[in-house]
Image: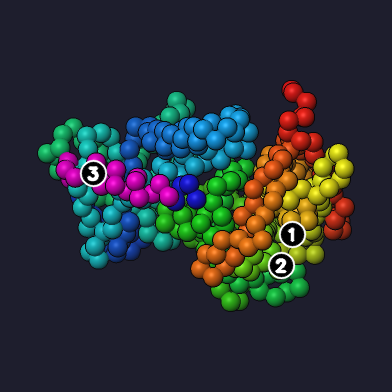
Amino acid sequence: MRVVCCLPLLLVATLRAQSHGATVSGTVICDDTGKPAHLAKVFLSSAEPGHAGEKMVHDMEAAMQKSMAKSGEPRTPPTEQQRKRQQQAAKQFDTVADLLSATNAGLDGTYRITGVKPGTYFVHAQVPGYVDPYTGFAPDDFTSTDPAIRARLAALPTVRIASDEENQSVTLHLQRGGALMGRVLFDDGSPAAGWTVWALHARELGEADLVLSPSLQSTTAKEMGKPVATTDDRGTYRVAGLPDGEYVLRADMGALPRGITGSNAMLAGSGVRIAVYSGNVLLASAAKPSAVRQGEERTEEDLVIPAKALRTLSGRVVAVSDGHPLNMGNVMLSSKQDGHLQAKAPIRRDGSFVFEDLPENVTYTLTLDDAADATYAPEGESLMGLNIALGKATQKYAHTTQDVLLGSSDTSSVQMRLRPADNAPSN
């Protein structure tokens, strides 16, 4: 949410920065047909490392800490997970900046970008099914001193702008990428419609997105021309535009937990998030990568969702002193076995929490940072006809973590016992 609310400011800053400057123009050609790339999306990406995203996230964090200090809340350092979220948010701000500076080519494949400031830029384009060489680089590659990586970067089309009066022309040639096609099915044979299918490069497999929901991840990826597809009513997908490399397929879906509607959406937490990987496994660490060649077309790359291996983990949060249930806060779930397994569930009025559809035989870490006793008004505030319960914390409780092994059956007996924050032992 913080990322979204700052987008208008970032847009204004970008538009102001591009009010005057040099011009870069040219034509985008599809090499396999020799014809223009109709309506290709063309980007100018700075070759000089920028820190706009890092600065924006830093400023947001500083403002939040300042607000907490005014309200008397302790200024606690961010946790490791929070730091990872901040790093990802910074990268996503930079991605948004690239999207805002992109333009579309015309039906004849020609493009024109104005307002370009002095500097060195990579010029690249995206068309579904074709390879954008720029997206094959990780963020760290652009500052790498590795000779092999530097040589690959040097092969990218580049312009060097020295003044606002320049006009430069760059012709871009796109090559068709590899493609993977198949179906996503449940283990009872029925099709999984509306699932997002990704072709993840081996190095991306360890990168869990801790900021965006599955739907926003998919939308952002499509805007950036990444290899992602959505299954149709028969569960069929086709992911195209793949350069040479080792890939793992991932199909995922986000949904509301059972019993959650718009009227009680505050109980949804992060919702249900299910993912299956190549080899029909539920853990990214167990996925089986395979080589894909540029221009290769592979069919029958099916994924089967082992729904029978998904379990529910639930329990209660209580006070150590007398066992009464706490009624405010959020339980955060993670796993050292797989960084992609991240979820949040609210503590309900009776102290209970629920996580649905988790992979079995995994040890999960449950973390509580904001648990509290709270009083709730008999009637909450009304928003668009919905009643929103607002609570006021009367006693906060200390940070705690607990490891839970979720075996081959549902677990409902987890009990997290907390001490009041003002009685917590100092570390």
- Counting from the top left corner in percent of width and height, residue 126 is at 37, 55
| Magenta region | 5-23
Q: How many marks?
A: 3
Q: Which residue, given by chain and number where applicable, does mark 2 sit on? A: 258
Of mark 1 and mark 3, the one earlier in the sequence is 3
- Most extreme residue toward the front is 378
Under tag 1, what secondary structure? strand
Q: Is residue 20 magenta?
A: yes
Image-based side of 180 in relation to 274, left or right:
left
Could you say which is closer to the camera, residue 326 or residue 237?
A: 326
Q: Which residue, given by chain and number where applicable, does mark 3 sit on? A: 16
Number of the label disc, if any, that sits on residue 356: 1
Amino acid carrying label 2: it is Arg
Amino acid carrying label 3: it is Arg
Instruction: Give how far apart the Cα atoms at labels 1 and 2 are.
Output: 9 Å
Above or below 426: residue 95:
below
Above or below 2: residue 424:
above
Could you say which is closer to the camera, residue 403 or residue 400?
A: 400
The secondary structure that most of the magenta stretch takes on is helix
Of mark 3 and mark 2, the one earlier in the sequence is 3
- Residue for point 61% across, 68% down: 263
